[in-house]
Image (cartoon, rainbow, N blue to C red):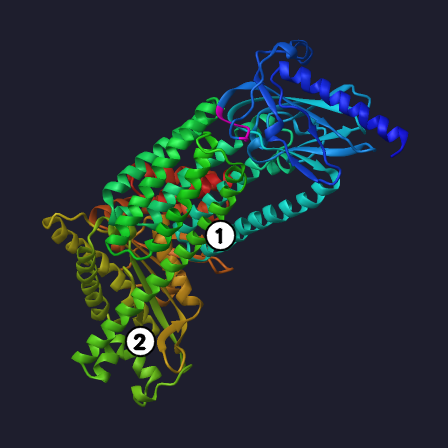
Amino acid sequence: MTRNSFAGRLRLACVLCLLGYFGGTAQAAGVLSLDPAAARYSLDPFVDYVLDEGWQFSEFRDLEPSLTFSRSESGALTFGYVNASYWLRLQVVNPDAVGRRWILELSGLSRAVDRIEAYIPDREGTYRRHLSGDSVPFNQRTIPHHSVLFAVELPAAQPRTLYLKVTTNGTLQLPMTLWEADAYIASEHHDTLLEGMFYGILAIMLFYNGFIYWSVKDHSYLFYVCYLVCVLGFALSIKGVGYEYFWPEQPAWNNKSNLVFAMVGILFVLLFARSFLKTAIYTPRVHQAIGLLMATALLSALGVLFLSHYHAASILSVQYSVSVLVVILAASLALKRGFTAARYYLLAWLSVLLSILLWVLNSANMITSYWVGGYLFQIGTTLQVLLFSFALADRINLMRSEREAALKLQLAHSRRLVSMSEMFERFVPKQFLTKIARSGIENIELGRADVAEVSILFADVRGFTAMSESLQPQELLNFLNAYLQRIDKVIHDHDGFIDKFIGDGVMALFESEQTQLGALNAVQAAIQMQKTVEIYNQHRANSGYPPIRIGVGVNTGEVVYGTVGSQDRMDSTVLGDNVNVAARLQDLTKVLQARVVISEHTLEVVGKGHGLIVREVGDVRVRGRREPVHIYEVLNADTEQDKAAKLHTLSNYRLAYENYRNGRWREAEALWVSCLELHPSDTVVQYLIAQCRTKLS
C-alpha cells in the first residue's frame, strides 16, 4: 500500500466518523459507501425524508441540523395519495481511487409526480438545481428522457449529500436506484424492449380490431378499438413516453392526461359491455345500471379537467371499481342465461381484476410494492386485451355456428316433409329452373348462365332494425311471415317471382317475352304493394301495432341468370349492374322519403298510355356506379290525399325542374318553395330545394 493510498483511506474514515456523529444528531440514515464492483444500488433504505413547510433550498440547508428526519419502516418510499411536498436526503461516498459518474433514477410511478427538484453537487461540490416531473416543461429536464434521471458525479474519497424536493397532488411512490452509467444503459435497453412489446401488442390489437370493424360494421369492435386507444394513451402518459414524444410543450395536459384517458376508457368499457353482452336482451336491469354509470363516467371525465389530481384520482378509483363489478355481473348473468360468447369476456375481467385492484391498492399505499406499480399494469392490460380479442372472435364463431345449426335443422325438417324435387322448388323459383336446369334439377351445372332483359324490384321495410329491437323473437317472426306473404301474393299476381328474401327485404324479378310488359308489371306491382301495406296497417292498428312503411325501387335492364358456389354447395342468382342499380334506387327512397322510385330506362320501356303519373327527380349518384342514374317518383303509389296535393302542384313542379335542368337554381328554388307551401310534407320537393341551395352556396 502506498503512502498516498493509506492517507486517502485514513481521511475517508475520519470523514465517515464525523458524518456518523453529526448524522446521529439529525436522525440520519448514515452514509452509503459504494462498492467499486457494484453496478446499482436500491437507495430506499438510505433515504431520509421530512415534510416540507415551504422552505427554499438555502433555508432548508440552514434548518437541516435541527430537523427530525424519518425513514420508511417498510424500506420503500411509498406515501399513498398526498397533496404535499417532501425533502429527501441521501448521503453517499465513493471510496474508489478515481471519480465515477452515476445515474440517479426514480422509476415506476415516480414519472407521475408533479414536480421534482434535485440539488446535486458538481465535481467541485457546488450544488446545482435540476428539474423533472410531469408538470415541468419537458425541455427543462437536465436529461431529456421520459424516465426521471439525474446525473451524479462522485469524486474519489469525497462524501456527497444529495437533496430532492418532491411535490405532488396524487400518488407518491419514489423507487430510487443509483446506477453506474454503463449498467444503466444496458438495463434501460431491456426495459425499452419490454415496453416496446407492450405498445406493439396494443397497436396490433388496435389495427386488427379496427380492420374487423371496417369489414363487419359491428359496433362492439368500434367501442373496443376506442377503449384500446384510451389504454394506449393512458400507458403513454403514465410512463412519460407521451410527454417526451407527443406533448412535450403541454405540461398542464401531461399532468391530467392519464386521468382523462382512464376516465374516457371507462366510458368505452361500459359501451363495449352493453354492445357485446347484449345487456338490453339478457340483463335489462344491469343495462339500466350501465347507462347510469355511463352518465357518471361522462360527468367524471369532465370533472377531471377541473378537480385536483387527488380528488380526480379518488373519483376515478370509485368509478372504475363499480364499473368493473357491474360488467362482471352482466357477463355472469348473460353466460348463465345462455349467451356463451360471454365466457372469454368474463375470463378477461376476472383475470385482470386482481391485478388492477392490486395496482389501485398500491397507489393508495395499502400495498407497498414498486413492482406492482411498475409492471402489473402492463401485464394485466396485455392479458385483458388478448382475452377481449378472443371474446370477439368467439362471438363471431358462435354466431356462425348458430346460423349453420339453424340452417341444418331447417333443411333436415324440409327433407322429412317433401321430396327432393319439391324441396328444391321451395328454395329455387320455377322461373330459375327453366333457365338453369332445362334438363332437370339433377343436371344443374355450376356456372351455367343465361342473359335476359328483366325488370328488377327491391322492397324494404323502413326502420326495421329499430322495430326488431322492440319485438320479441316470436313476434318478429310472425310479423315477417305476415308481411312477406302479402308481398309475395302481389308479386305473383303481376307475373313476377321472388328471387331472394333479404331479412325484411325482397328482391323480385319480372320477365316477359315483351320487355314492356315485364316493366309495366314491375311498376304496377310496386304500386299495389303500397296499397296492400295500407290495408295491412289497418289490421296492425286493430291489433295494437304501429303502422309500417316500405320503399320500392324498380330498374330494367340486362342481367345474368346463373349458378354460383362450388360443386358441393351452389345457389341460383342474378348478376349485373342493373341489379345493383335497382337496389340503390330502393335505398334512395329512404333519402327522398318516397314510396316508389323507378329509373328513366324503366319509364321509357313502359311507355305512355298506362295511367302512370310520375315526377322527374333528376340525376342521382348511386354507390358503386360511376355514371349517375336519372330517376322518377311514381305518384300512383301515394295515398289519395298526397297524390291529389302533388297533382295540384305538378305544373309548378315541372316548371321548376325545367329551370333546375338549365342551371337556374334560384328560379327553381322559388317555384319549389311555392309547391312546398301548398304541400309542406312533400319530402321530394324538400330534397330538391336542398339541392338548389347547395348549388347556390
Which residue occupies the foreground of this view, 534 or 196?
196
307 left or right, relative to 21? left
Q: Where is residue 585, by image quadrant?
A: bottom left
SS for callout 1: helix
Q: Where is residue 270, by image quadrant?
A: top left
Residue that label 2 marks: 512
Residue 641 x/y as whole percent: 21, 46
Q: Residue at x 59, y 30 (%)?
A: 44
Which residue occupies the foreground of this view, 26 or 408?
26
694 left or right, relative to 467? right
Magenta residues span 75-81
Residue 302 x/y as whole percent: 44, 28
SS for callout 2: loop
Q: Residues within 10 Å of mark 1 (few under 14, many from 20)?
A: some
| Amino acid type assigned to the residue bearing label 1 in the image | Gly
Residue that label 1 marks: 210
Residue 439 x/y as whole percent: 32, 90
